[in-house]
Image (spheres, rainbow, N blue to C red):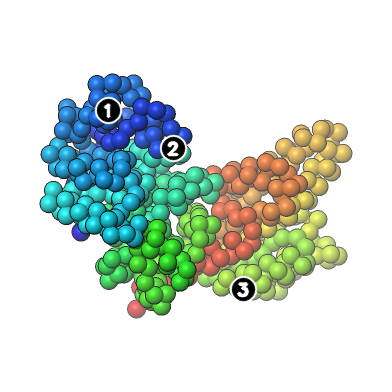
Amino acid sequence: MAWNPEFEIAFNPKTVAVVGATRKPLLFGDFVASLQNAGFPGRIYPININAAGEEIHGLKAYPNLVSVPEPIDLVTASIPAQAIIPMLEDCIAANAKNIQIYTAGFRESGDEKGIALEEKLQEVAKRGGLRIVGPNCMGLHVPASRITTWTMLDEPGPVAFIAQSGGHAGVFIIDAPDYGIHLSKVISYGNAAVIDSIDFLEYLATDPETQIICIYLEGVRDGGRLTTLVREINKTKPVIIWKGGATESGARAAASHTGALGGEREVWDAFFKQTGAVRVDGREELLNATMTFRYLCPLVSNRVALVGGGGGNSVAAADVCDRAGLNVPPFSEKTRRELGSFIPRQGTIIRNPIDIAFVMLDVNVLVRAMEASAADPSIDAVIFILPPGVILLAAGILQSKEKCTFEEAMEKQTRLVLDTMIKFDRENIHRKPLVIVLQPGLLRFLPGQRERLRQELLKAGIPVYLSIERASRALGKFIRYHQFHRILRAD
């Protein structure tokens, strides 16, 4: 179906009916409690024929949808599969057209009964003009409207996620804030019996609250329409796609998960080549790529300066960047002279990558090195790889010098590093973006400090990665996206 604007009220409903509302508190699946805990400002109507007239979570329960005393903007259904069709007939009678069905046991089961049940669901939906998300899904998550299935409800943001998998949607919601990602809408659509991923994509294309669109996709019914839509949307809103079922084994799993037919890998390769959509191969890549698009402005090219410590680490980092499509060019003679004027020659390398190891204990030297790197005309971005022991060692020196406690020295040194990095990113006159890598060793040396550094830097608009591999892959995808569109505009 083409996008029906009348479904848009489901993203900002004033009334929600929960069919299958339970009288017993549940750890998960208590959809009335989820809405209440989220602070949903509208009216909630629990529907349970066995509890009619009683209270569920302090709200009067109704026997069916028809008995609800006002129009229903969104119906949430979690009842046995065999009860779904009669419930849909109730929806038609109550003129409740927007429905999300969590119930499984349809086409994804692979058996004749489940397939026939989904076909009946489609027939009833068509006859009644019903707009159905699911079945076999986790429905809608809209932070601005306080609509959610999950317990996590963060502040609203500009990133949307369309997911065929409810599990992937839930984990994305939980993990996104750790990457500085805040969400406009998350849509888990399951079997897509009535409304498909393409329909939601059509809606998000013009949604003013959404700037970046992420998709987890196992299969799609209309590949031509998807290609046309993504090619057009991707010009103004980056579309980042995690294609599930890309391998033969994955395709078999997708068929049993949502009944999706994934298609040939070659077809999807051609799709990404034609549309310029950003391809990721897992949840971690999805989160890192989304963070990159959220926090970085387009780069002129793929040339980066690496600032870090340890000769072997620098060589390995350069290799990783090269494999991801990044260029680590040698600095100009002018830049090398500038670096050599304040960096000791012993135990350091100033060609790019910069290996300044323990010189980084002096943040003033570190900032001068980054400023010189940013000034080089052959550099488009600066990647600072923070070695695990730098803050720890600097705090030890500070403790001895100022006769304070180690905790006080750690706090002072951490604050100094944070303020210095933020100031450099905001004030460097060359406007070369700063990217920071917090190496894994920080977790062992500084329990809790790595996450603190990460969150404060993200709040300042600086993308932070937990390894050079993650940073380089995400940057490579980001740069290729913008190169694709520069070529497209030139043509």
Q: Is residue 362 left or right of residue 56?
A: right
Above/below status of 108 relative to 17: below
Q: For mark 3, what is the residue? A: 322
Among the two numbered marks 2 and 1 on one chain, the one whose residue lies closer to the N terminus:
2
Q: Residue 118: image x %, image y %? A: 25, 55
483 or 210: which is nearer to us?
Answer: 210
Q: For mark 1, what is the residue? A: 50
Q: Rounded to the nearest whole Å, what is the CA distance between mark 3 and mark 2?
A: 45 Å
Residue type (three-letter) at the residue carrying disc 3: Asp
User: Furthest residue to the front?
Assistant: 112
Above/below status of 239 relative to 92: below
Name which residue lies at 17% across and 39% down.
Answer: 90
Which image quadrant for residue 488?
Answer: bottom left
Which image quadrant for residue 306?
Answer: bottom right
The secondary element bearing badge 3 is classed as: helix
Q: Is residue 439 left or right of residue 23?
A: right
Q: For mark 2, what is the residue? A: 28
Q: Residue 97: image x %, image y %? A: 18, 44
Above/below status of 31 relative to 307: above
Q: Rounded to the nearest whole Å, what is the CA distance between mark 1 and mark 3?
A: 64 Å
Give the label on residue 439, or none. none
Residue type (three-letter) at the residue carrying disc 2: Phe
269 or 393: which is nearer to us?
Answer: 269
Among the two numbered marks 3 and 2 on one chain, the one whose residue lies closer to the N terminus:
2
Q: Is residue 167 left or right of residue 205?
A: right
Q: Are marks 2 and 1 in contact (CB under 8 Å)?
A: no
The secondary element bearing badge 1 is classed as: helix
Q: Can residue 395 be spotted in the picture? A: yes
